[in-house]
Image: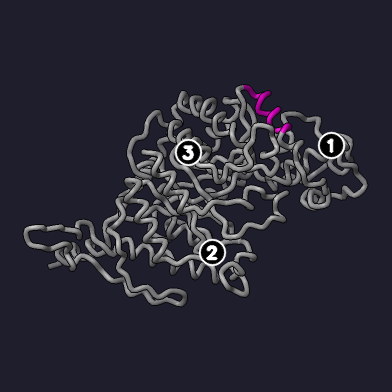
Amino acid sequence: MPRQHIRLGFSIWATGFHPAGWRLPEARADGTFDPAFLKRTALLSEAAKLDFYFIGDRVVGLPEQQTEHPNLVLRPEALTLAGYVAAITERIGVVATVNTTYAHPFNVARATATLDHLSGGRIALNVVTGRDPEAAANFGRDAHWGTDQRFDSATEFTEIIHQLWDSWEDGALVAEKDRGRFLDQDRVHRIDFRGEQFQVAGPLNITRPPQGQVPILTAGESERSKEYGARYADIRFGHALQLGKAKAYYADIKGRLAKHGRAPDSQSLVCGIAYYVGGTKAEGHALYRRVQELTVAPPNLSPLAAALGVDLSAERPDAWIAEVPALAALPPDAAAIIEQAKLSYGDDRITLLDVFRTWRRSRGGAEVVGGPKEVADYFETWFHERAADGFILFPPTMPGALEAFTTHVVPELQRRGLFRLEYEGATFRSHFNLAWPENRHAAARRLRQEVA
């Protein structure tokens, strides 16, 4: 897969990715269930020629999380929203998230195949296994599964949906009206899967998806998640780290593919990143400070002190960092936290509270702040340094952040030849240069005929 340009997707956070983003006067608190609002975000993303519109999901919503995660307390069901977005757009890819720990593969294979037909081949499936222990009670379980059990289940789940998508060979629906033959029964197959978690007979009751196999995305930091991704994922979703760590992560993820007979560029690595952009660098930094200052959570320097490896118990949150002796000689990883805060605020004169607010959101990861040039420079560096193949855009505020990116940053990336001017194809696979997969039953028949 040639790396022709940076891959870009927009992730819908209706109240903004930042937990205080909804407090801006222009922000919407009800965007999660406002069809006009959601339609505008989808159409803006498509008009900018973004590769995909990303819909996350959560199967639990806890009111007590409103301070830290208001955008997760309200969360639309992803497959339903994917159908809506697919219906109002024409070219952009649409990613729907499914938690395999609390779903059934037959239903998901059927729903995604249907969506792929209705969208003309623009659907992709983001597989997650869930991290919320509270979700278990919503599905009649006593406890949330551990990592190994969740990925054992996800592996079975993925094998099943792949087999179900292939249970109808291409062209099996013959519709021979003169003969009265609706389908070629020899080209429709049961799968008779029997595993530890699932037993599924098949076949699917909808024909093979237009893309053959619906592309799969996945994320996660555990060893099991990385191996799952190396085996199954067409797109790997990571988190933006400092550049050196990001390059090491990129090399690790790409290096795992060979074990599964895959080339390094057969899978794209896209990083989720929060961005604060204005028409100028100063406007971007002003937006950043404006949002941070609306933070509701009270300052707690203890977690920050632990991350820095210093004692801040005697320090005031409003102390200037230059006046805190404990910050004078930090090791590189700790110093990077301070530097990230300076970069985000665009100012060396910041307080411990400023550092805390930056670290609280990024946990040492990266965010990009500035004008069109600064954001484009950042993306270009990461792309050419092979720290990422692209990015999933996390808008800190809505509306406004998407409009700012499409108005200011996309034209700058296009001017540099780093992003498309028009869509090259009409399917999710074409956007990522993914090969169309041959049906497994047709391939087996072809091989038998070649041997004979």
- Residue at 39 percent across and 43 percent down: it is 87
| Mark nearer the N terminus (1 vs 3) | 3
| Mark nearer the N terminus (2 vs 3) | 3
* Element under disc 1: helix
Q: Are marks 1 and 3 in contact (CB under 8 Å)?
A: no
Q: Where residue 36 sits: x, y (%)? A: 50, 38
Query: Label 1 belongs to which residue?
Result: 321
User: What is the residue that sits farthest to the right in this orientation?
Assistant: 314
Image height of 149 relative to 120, above or below: below
Q: CA distance from mark 2 to mark 3?
A: 36 Å
Image height of 111 relative to 197, above or below: above
Query: Label 3 belongs to which residue?
Result: 39
Query: Label 2 belongs to which residue?
Result: 224
Which residue type does callout 3 highlight?
Lys
Bounds of the magenta segment: 280-290
Q: Where residue 348 sits: x, y (%)? A: 78, 30
* Element under disc 2: helix
| Figure colour scheme | one colour
Q: Which dot, 1 or 3, sits closer to the camera?
A: 3
Q: Is residue 242 visible?
A: no
